[in-house]
Image (spheres, rainbow, N blue to C red):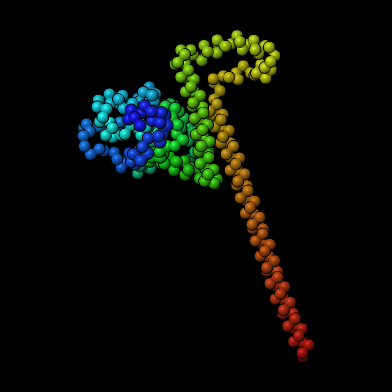
């Protein structure tokens, strides 16, 4: 494994691809400061901060131990006293940016989570979208095997707490988070890819579609695409907010699920109550009938003896 992250496994596109034990030590604060040799003033926090700044400005590919040593004014080998390489550094960078909207350890949130789970999902989606806009390199990495640090766990804790009132099963709550995040990532990736295409080609979106316009007009007039030809002029308008539309539909879908589950629980409760009431009534009636019959029989036998 090359320290500069030159191998396929450590080139900085997948979390959890380095020394997992070392990443966990650094994330959880058990290996922050080397015992000897570092340049005074150099800290793990400064290294991660510099790495995030470079990634934000130039993309993840620009992050290297050599580049960071230049940014920090230190020798490259000094960085390795703090972090083994780019793969482990990526784990630290991810946990750093995931924790940006969250309070520090030991602090209470500035605002309590919304009491309504719908507002919580709305806030969750908007916060994540804002994070992806500020750090577009997040869309370039494989987070399938994320090394969980304190920020990632704190974020998951807050999300689950806010969604608990939905009354869903635990795996379903996790699925709600995955669904919302996947929706946000999809839209953010489309926007990021469009911006990247402009940078790489030098053509604006308008120029790109203007080049295709004569061919598309002929295709529409051919009669081969009647559905496409019938679309309104503003169908592909940039003014239509796909994020708002999709988020509202997601929340409406979850609302229908929660309402259905609530109705099911109410029906089950009513059925259980009715069943218990029938059982209790049968038992009471049997007991009363037995007691009455016994009393009548005893009275009749006593009268006959007399």
Q: Residue at x 68, y 65 (%)?
A: 281
Q: Which residue is drawn at 45% across and 34% down?
A: 143
Task: Specify whether 111 is left or right of 246.
Answer: left
Above or below residue 172? Residue 283 is below
Task: Specify whether 34 is left or right of 87.
Answer: left
Above or below residue 44? Residue 224 is above
Q: Residue at x 61, y 50 (%)?
A: 265
In front of the other: 8 or 136: 8
Q: Is residue 49 visible?
A: no
Above or below residue 288? Residue 29 is above
Q: Residue furthest front?
A: 1
Above or below residue 198? Residue 105 is below
The percent position of residue 49, horizontal first and vertical second, equals 32, 30
The percent position of residue 255, horizontal first and vertical second, equals 58, 40
In front of the other: 167 or 96: 96
The percent position of residue 117, horizontal first and vertical second, equals 52, 41
Which image quarter: residue 217? top right
What is the quadrant of the N terminus in the image?
top left
In front of the other: 45 or 33: 33
What is the quadrant of the C terminus in the image?
bottom right
Q: Which residue lies furthest to the bottom in this view?
A: 306
The percent position of residue 171, horizontal first and vertical second, equals 53, 44
Q: How many labels does the image show?
A: 0
């Amino acid at each position: 494994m090359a320290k500069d992250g030159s191998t396929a496994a450590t080139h900085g596109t997948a979390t959890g691809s380095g020394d997992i034990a070392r990443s966990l030590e650094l994330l959880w604060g058990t290996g922050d400061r080397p015992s000897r040799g570092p340049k005074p003033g150099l800290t793990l926090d400064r290294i991660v901060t510099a790495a995030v700044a470079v990634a934000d400005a130039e993309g993840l590919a620009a992050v290297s131990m050599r580049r960071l040593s230049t940014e920090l004014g230190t020798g490259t080998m000094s960085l390795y006293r703090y972090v083994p390489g780019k793969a482990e550094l990526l784990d630290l960078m991810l946990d750093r940016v995931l924790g940006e909207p969250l309070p520090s350890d030991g602090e209470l949130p500035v605002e309590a989570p919304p009491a309504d789970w719908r507002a919580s999902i709305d806030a969750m989606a908007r916060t994540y979208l804002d994070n992806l806009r500020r750090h577009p390199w997040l869309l370039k990495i494989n987070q399938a095997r994320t090394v969980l640090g304190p920020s990632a766990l704190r974020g998951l804790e807050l999300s689950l707490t806010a969604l608990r009132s939905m009354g869903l099963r635990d795996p379903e709550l996790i699925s709600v988070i995955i669904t919302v995040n996947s929706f946000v990532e999809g839209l953010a990736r489309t926007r990021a890819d469009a911006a990247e295409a402009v940078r790489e080609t030098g053509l604006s979106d308008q120029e790109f579609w203007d080049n295709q316009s004569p061919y598309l007009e002929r295709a529409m007039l051919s009669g081969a695409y009647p559905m496409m030809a019938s679309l309104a002029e503003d169908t592909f308008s940039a003014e239509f907010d796909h994020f708002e539309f999709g988020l509202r539909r997601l929340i409406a879908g979850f609302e229908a699920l929660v309402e259905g589950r609530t109705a099911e629980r109410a029906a089950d409760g009513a059925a259980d109550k009715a069943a218990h009431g029938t059982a209790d009534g049968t038992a009471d009636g049997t007991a009363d009938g037995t007691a009455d019959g016994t009393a009548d029989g005893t009275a009749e036998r006593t009268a006959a003896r007399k």
